[in-house]
Image: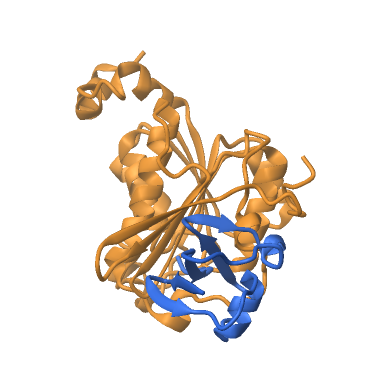
Amino acid sequence: MKIQVNEQALILPNSMNLEQLLVHLEKPLIGSAVAVNMQVISRSEWTQYNINEGDNISLFQAIAGG
Amino acid sequence: MLSDNELLRYSRHLLLEEVGESGQHKLKQAKVLIIGMGGLGSPAALYLAAAGIGHLVLNDFDEIEVSNLQRQITYQSSDIGEPKVEVTKQRLQQLNSDIKVRSINKQMPEQQLSMELTMADLVLDCTDNIATRQMINKACVEAKVPLIVGAAIRLEGQLMFFDHSQAESPCYHCLFPSSEEQTLNCSNSGIIGPVVGTIGTLQALEAIKYFVGLPSGIKNKLKLFDGKSLDWQTFAINKDPQCPVCGQA
């Protein structure tokens, strides 16, 4: 399945949900936020969102500095 | 009614149909609580004081250090060791003696923050740690006070606006549910001054727009700023139905 993650093309070996994607990419689950097609998906919904072909996924971290 | 001096001082606002005399009067009535007087709070406070926001409450508990001066533009070398809120208050009153400025030189516990929110129309979160950000968010949700959140590290900025006077508004916790300090801050990651200054300046712009009645481009949205490319990304934030902070409403 072909998707985009932070504007880079990525081929997933199998279907997966957002939480599985973060684990697959070895990204921290704590402090991360995920958006699919410019819509933030709440942490509580990561396991319910199954990634679709062509999804444009953005991963970013909470930043605290000020 | 505005005085002759005010008509002159704010003449560049009065020329704008988006502000005008009625908008300037709304700014004069406005009460804003700014929490954090660092790289975000410095430009935000200066711009809001200059714009004639009538009541500013400044909160921080830090003293000025030499490493602050690279980006916290309210302060001068001779201020090192002085409390940030006291120096800022003095600068703002020198800038605009028409406005009222009050300082709170301590880390506010939840109860005091809640009490302050009963007197605030809007809050700017200009702090530097997640635990405080979560506490401010929760208090603003409970008090139904709109919250403009800014954050920056390295060459990256984040900006969002949650109008908690609206029951359907999402909150900061819907976006970032963790309160663990795994997050990045200026001390551990570094920051370029104009990046954090850009975000603080935009917090002030959104505050002014809110009071004069202009729609916000960032309501229920997260803006990410890339200081390398100067690109912005905009993400929609929905209320998390499972959110323990705002979900039960």
- On the image, the x and y values in percent for residue B227 come to 29, 67
Determine whether B123 is above or below B7 in the image: below
Question: Furthest residue to the top?
Answer: B1
Question: Furthest residue to the right?
Answer: B248
User: Which tint was used for chain B?
Assistant: orange
Determine whether B11 is above or below A6 in the image: above
- On the image, the x and y values in percent for residue B203 come to 41, 48
Residue found at x 42% / y 37%: B216
Check the picture and name the quadrant holding the C terminus of chain B: top right
Asked if residue B4 lies left or right of residue B100, the reply is: left
- On the image, the x and y values in percent for residue B139 come to 69, 48
Asked if residue B130 lies left or right of residue A59, the reply is: right
Instruction: Please name the colour scheme applied to the rendered image.
Output: by chain
User: Which tint was used for chain A?
Assistant: blue
B37 and A21: which is toward the camera: A21
Residue found at x 62% / y 83%: A23
Examine the image and state in which quarter residue B119 appears: top right
A3 and B190: which is toward the camera: A3
Determine whether B63 is above or below B160 in the image: below
Residue found at x 60% / y 72%: A31
- On the image, the x and y values in percent for residue A25 come to 55, 84
Check the picture and name the quadrant holding the N terminus of chain B: top left
Examine the image and state in which quarter residue B84 appears: bottom left
Examine the image and state in which quarter residue B169 appears: top right
Q: Is residue B75 visible?
A: no
Determine whether B215 is above or below B32 in the image: above
B72 and B243: which is toward the camera: B243
